[in-house]
Amino acid sequence: MGKVYSMVIKYLDSKRFSGTSTGAGWSIDGASYDNKSFNTSSQESTLQGISFKDDGTKMYIIGSGSDKIHQYSLSTSFDVSTVSYDTVSLTVSTEDTDMQDLFFKPDGTKIFAIGRTNNKVYQYSLSTAWDLSTASYDSVSFSVLSQAVNSNGVTFKSDGTKMYNTSGNTDTVYQYTLSTAWDLSTASYDSVSFSVLSQDTSPNGVTFKSDGTKMFIIGSSNDKVYQYSLSTVWDLSTASYDSISFSVISQSLSPSGIFFKSDGTKMFITHEGGVIYQYTTSSSDKTTLTNVQDNSIFVEKDTGRRYWSSLGTQPDTITKDSQSYAQNEAASSLTISSFTVGSNSNRILIVAVGEYNAEPAVTGITWNGSEAFTEILTYSTGLRAGLWYLINPTATTANVVITYASTAKSGAGVYSFYNVDQSSPIGATNSASGTTASPSPTITPTTTGSIIVDSITHITGVGATLVDTLTAGWSQSMNLPTHDQRKQGSQYSTTPTIGSANNMNWTSSVSAGFGWVGVEVKSTTSPSTTWTMEPTFEDDFSTIKGWVSSDTAQNNVNTTNQNMDCGFPTDTTNNAISYDLTSTSDSAWVCRFKIRFSALSLGAQANWWAGLSSLDSSSNSGASHDFIGIQTDNANYGSQEKDGQALTGEGGQNNQALSWAINTDYYFEITRLTTTTFQVKLFSDSAYSTQVGSTSTGTCPSTVTGLRYIKFTNAITSGSGDWTGTIDDVEFYNGVTTPN
């Protein structure tokens, strides 16, 4: 019997299958903290709003302390652990002395800031996109005082024709229309609002999914992010609460601003005290299905996008059930009383112990009277720190009893976790010691889904006087006070980096000796279904399919070799080939292809272009048309756009140097990010995971539209040069900027 295939169609109003819909939008349900943050207090101690450049390489903040907008760079896009200050700022105190939030026009040429002193939104222009040093006030503002006293957040519809702001006085979001996009002087109130009072009495930042189907609010009365859906996009009168929220209280007690990466996979929250926190969210537009077969097809009703499934396993999330600690001044045993282990599956108890090495060693640990722990490892030179574990403890309320060889002064803490591998729970281990006020031992976990648990004993006093506490670098921790000169502690990391050394940082004001141990605790796994987005168009070149060539001697579909043979001579003959997609988005798409050259003769004017065009192959590169894609020459490639113009031999935008070689696979990706921005990337692999060089970014007028043809074409010129090779694996994704 052959493979069984099934097709599942997403109808939100039917019950054709078992599953849970996340809707056509981002979701904060299941979001997690990345353990990454950035402190802005050197520039802004009363942090409010945050924004990023669309590619994540620039970050901007605003606050009511400095009343300035500050600019930063990120060496890794959308990773706040790589942020550095550009020493560039824009003073906005002349407009308002209590600035609360900011919003960038998607092309980086406009900033809008909202202040509470005057309850106005202010408009600024940048002569160079994303360069704050070129910003200036437009002398244009719009008052929201009639609606929003104590104005906090501001955001815009992606095309600049709608504006929204929050009020901490009325606990409401208000909606406005701009008759001219991005021009505040044309704004007017829509008499449309939405109350969030039932969720939070101090709404601050507000943002929307780029298609207007979701709204997110950060509130400081409960320290949560709240998620809402709009049945009519961008229309607040159709908003409803999704009954989904995400608490940030473990990181921030005064959250003020919110920002999402454009694909919804990252969320950034500002803390009023001057810290930015980074989170991972869900960007899935799919329905979570149960009992679907391998090789199923999922079709999203809203967009017609297809997803192909494959079954596998994924790690379960190790979750803490409870924790507690105790200390002993002088006894042969130490009891952590009335500790509760819940009935969750795949349980483990981890005990962290610490004492002087001169004290008697631990001889055993029990749970519930008789269930014995196993020692993982103990550091025992000068100071003692140890970790013990018990698999599948009885779910009950009972005592943890630590027994010593004789009378000891000691401290211990216990964690209860679940979703832990029962057959092989312990992975990597490590121990460390030294003399410092800031111990930073490391451990390298090996298994996806693992967590790290540690135990440390540190000298923190003089004589019998304890002068300092011991502070963990991770938020999940236990400080275990003991006696005399010692402090003992334990912490755990829920999101370690697998395969890399993870720092388990501790800090004290006392530079003194420490002993430390750490272990990797491995998770269970569960069946999973991975859904991969299928392209709107793809070609294996097994058939002609619809490609049209202006010169089949140079460019044609080779169905025998299942590729496209291509030749791009630099001459006065039109050598082009195209495919008609019929229609494409004017703001979001991705085009990918592989090209490989068997022969190169590259003169100074040797060029070829690839991308989306408003004209098919019957029109040569010299014709007037709209185009977004790649331009090449003998030593470069770059992003290229045309708005009713010819493709000529001048250089593209942000050219990237490239030494072209024969018999080398080049994987190009062209992405239209917005109506006015696009980018070109080069990769070395078919998974488009290993980028070569830097991204070539480009800008274009919003009037570059009607790009219905995938097109490859040569240069029409009297110069010299020739490119001969093959094109394969052509893919096109419509309406998205990131295939998933």
Image: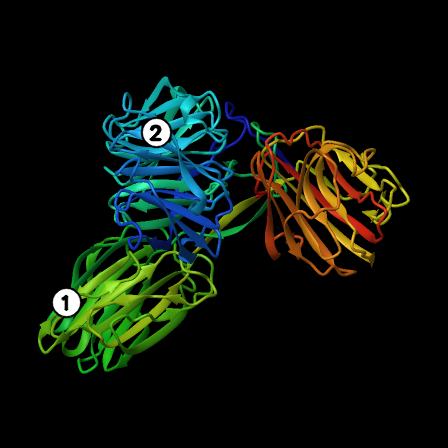
Local crowd size for mark 1, using a 10 Å CA cut-off: few (<14), some (14–19), many (≥20): many
Q: Identify residue type, mark 1.
A: Gln
- Residue 619: x %, y % from top left: 81, 33
Which color scheme is applied?
rainbow
Q: Residue at x 59, y 31 (%)?
A: 702
Q: Residue at x 54, y 26 (%)?
A: 11
Say left or right for 722 vs 490.
Answer: right
Say left or right for 370 vs 211.
Answer: left
Which comes sooner in the sequence, label 1 or label 2? 2
Q: Residue at x 43, y 41 (%)?
A: 135
- Residue 173: x %, y % from top left: 33, 26
- Residue 555: x %, y % from top left: 85, 44
Q: Which residue is mark 2?
A: 165
Would you say residue 403 is visible in this rendering? yes
Look at the image and tell me in which quarter the C terminus lies. Answer: top right
Where 623 falls versus 430 (above or below)?
A: above
| The furthest residue to the top | 191
Circle on res. 136 = none
User: Of residues 722 and 452, which is closer to you in this image?
Assistant: 722
Q: Residue at x 37, y 56 (%)?
A: 494
Q: Which residue is mark 1?
A: 327
Q: Secondary structure at mark 2?
A: strand
Q: Identify residue type, mark 2.
A: Asn
Where 471 falls versus 418 (above or below)?
A: below
Look at the image and tell me in which quarter the N terminus lies. Answer: top right
Q: CA distance from mark 1 to mark 2?
A: 52 Å
Q: Secondary structure at mark 1?
A: strand
